[in-house]
Image (spheres, coloured by chain):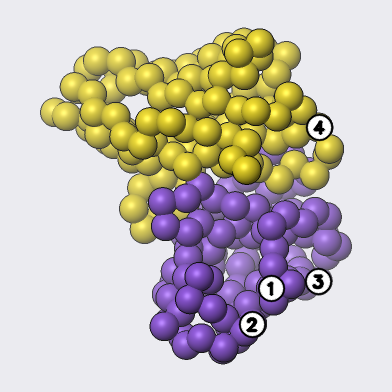
Amino acid sequence: DSGVTQTPKHLITATGQRVTLRCSPRSGDLSVYWYQQSLDQGLQFLIQYYNGEERAKGNILERFSAQQFPDLHSELNLSSLELGDSALYFCASSPGLVNEQFFGPGTRLTVL
Amino acid sequence: DQQVKQNSPSLSVQEGRISILNCDYTNSMFDYFLWYKKYPAEGPTFLISISSIKDKNEDGRFTVFLNKSAKHLSLHIVPSQPGDSAVYFCAASDQTGANNLFFGTGTRLTVIP
């Protein structure tokens, strides 16, 4: 158990809908990262927050947004969902701006 | 464009033998490399890392080797155990300070008892 929690574990929704994925980092970790893993692909970095501020952006679509709250939990919002958004979404956290990141179990999103 | 590549999608090894997983990268700005292990229905678990100032790092049965000139790293597991069966991801970060990770597509290791 990495100490990073993600909810929900599974999510099934329809095209055009909007969903919110939630992540609670390890106690004391200030950095939160979101990654997307599509079928047979590596993990693709989406976005990073550090102590409430956006720190880095990767290949995140404009339909996706995220935020980190004062209690350091983070939410990833996915809107106008398309079939291709079906993937595993992982959240990771780290104590600061260090490389070793600790991953949650992921949320499996299925868009029908 | 995949900046970190793991060209072997799968590898099978007998228990007790050495497992060697390979990883290549294209971005010369990468300065820190990590290996993660992933079991089904779980998130990746950090295994071992190496900074670009070193060419080897060892932790128990796991050793990572870095060849900067060839832009290649490898993970050696000796001796391999059935519990090592998992998907292994190579990852790298660059010098921009953002410390987000670039992942390879993974190699599925099967250790045969």
- At a point 58% along the width and 34% down the height, the residue shown is B4
In 3D space, how far apart are the residues under numbered discs 3 and 2 (Cα atoms)?
Answer: 23 Å
Q: Could you say which disc has been placed on residue A70 in the image?
A: 3
Q: Which mark is residue A64?
A: 1
Mark 4 vs mark 2: in front: 2
Marks 4 and 2, how far apart in space? 32 Å
Looking at the image, which residue is at 57% across and 88% down? Answer: A16
**Is A87 situated above or below B77?**
below
- How many other residues sit within 10 Å of disc 2, few (<14), some (14-19) or many (≥20)? some
The residue at 50%/26% (across/down) is B23
Which chain shows up in yellow?
Answer: B
Q: Quarter of the image for the C terminus of chain A: give it.
A: bottom left
Dot 3 and dot 2 within a common chain: yes
**Labels 1 & 4 near each other (Cβ < 8 A):** no
Query: Callout 2, which amino acid?
Result: Ser
Disc number lying in front (3 or 4):
4
Q: CA distance from mark 1 to mark 4?
A: 26 Å
Q: Which mark is residue B95?
A: 4
Which of the two labelled residues, at mark 3 and mark 2, occupies the earlier sequence position?
3
Residue identified by numbered label 2: A79
- Chain ID at mark 3: A
Q: Amino acid at mark 3?
A: Pro
Q: Which chain is purple?
A: A
Hey, what amino acid is under mark 1? Phe
Near mark 4 (Cα within 10 A), the count class, few <14, some 14-19 or many ≥20, is few
Q: Secondary structure at mark 2?
A: loop
Q: Secondary structure at mark 1?
A: strand
Measured as percent of width and height from the top left, residue B40 is found at: 34, 53
> Mark 2 touching mark 1, by CB under 8 A?
yes
